[in-house]
Amino acid sequence: MSIDQPSRRAVLAGSVVTLGAGGAYYLTRSDDTAQHLSPSFHSSDETSAFGVDLGGKPIMGSRAAPLEIYYWTDFQCPFCERFERETLPDLVREYVEPGDVRIVFVSVPYFGADSMTAAVAGKCVWERVRDDDPGAYWDWHTAVFDEQGEKNSGWASTDNLLEYTRSVDAVDADALESCLEDRRSEFEAEVEADAEQATEFGISATPSFVVFDPESEAAGSLTGAQPPERFDDAIERVRDA
């Protein structure tokens, strides 16, 4: 994958390194799982130096983290589930919790209508919890991934998402239902805009990642359920660029 786009020429003028491609599963497994994490989250209404509107997007980690990882994901994507279960715990422990990296979650509906419904539901939940209890978003996010079934089998339908939400104590399923009824078109437009921007960046698959240093404007990209070592390499190379 390349993110070498004219619209990002200030960032991408010779500084981008592609650090892994393909969606193949890898065979190692972390001892931790995403369900056991309790990472901090925060919100922002700014547009980042990378050109991403952070409004409405969950951000894991410290506001002051010197590096950013942009993570394009789809709740129906099996490689995203694999990444969150096998690699994300290591990234949180090694980089997010020490304050070295923050991760911006960008939902894109690559697998159809149910992917869009899940992405909109995520926006509803985030808006509901971001000011008072942003960590509750993680409980909901992992609960949905825990229920992942075959793509477009109906597991991510509105009714099923509401059922999963009832198992998350800190998230109001009735409020989610109201949001899906009243604000679906608004949030669908935001998700579509995020997907269009992803295409402008050359992103065509999930999960996809960009490691970015706002100070140097160096960036590196990865695609697929990559092992922690790939991210170690990406972070090191962007830091040293």
Image (cartoon, rainbow, N blue to C red):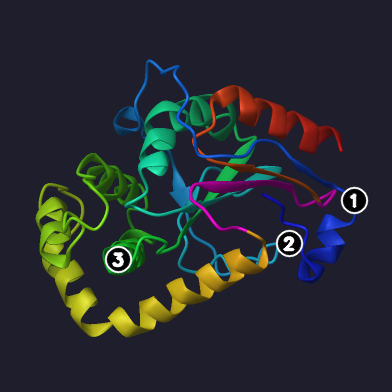
User: Which amino acid does the dot numbered 3 rest on?
Assistant: Arg
Label 3 to label 1, Cα distance in Å?
41 Å
Query: Which residue, given by chain and number where applicable, does mark 3 sit on?
Result: 128
Query: Which residue, given by chain and number where applicable, does mark 1 sit on?
Result: 14
User: Which amino acid does the dot numbered 1 rest on?
Assistant: Gly
- Residue 162 picture location, percent across and down: 13, 60
**Which class describes the residues within 10 Å of circle 2: few (<14), some (14-19), or many (20+)?**
some
Label 2 to label 1, Cα distance in Å?
17 Å
- Residue 87 picture location, percent across and down: 47, 29
Looking at the rendered image, the disc whose residue lies closer to the viewer, 2 or 1, is 1
Does label 3 or label 1 sit earlier along the sequence?
1
User: Horizontal placement of 135 versus 69: left or right?
Assistant: left
Q: Residue at x 21, y 58 (%)?
A: 156
Q: Residue at x 78, y 38 (%)?
A: 238
Q: Which mark is residue 3?
A: none
Identify the element where label 3 is drawn.
Answer: helix
User: Horizontal placement of 87 versus 32: left or right?
Assistant: right
Query: Which residue, given by chain and number where applicable, does mark 2 sit on?
Result: 49
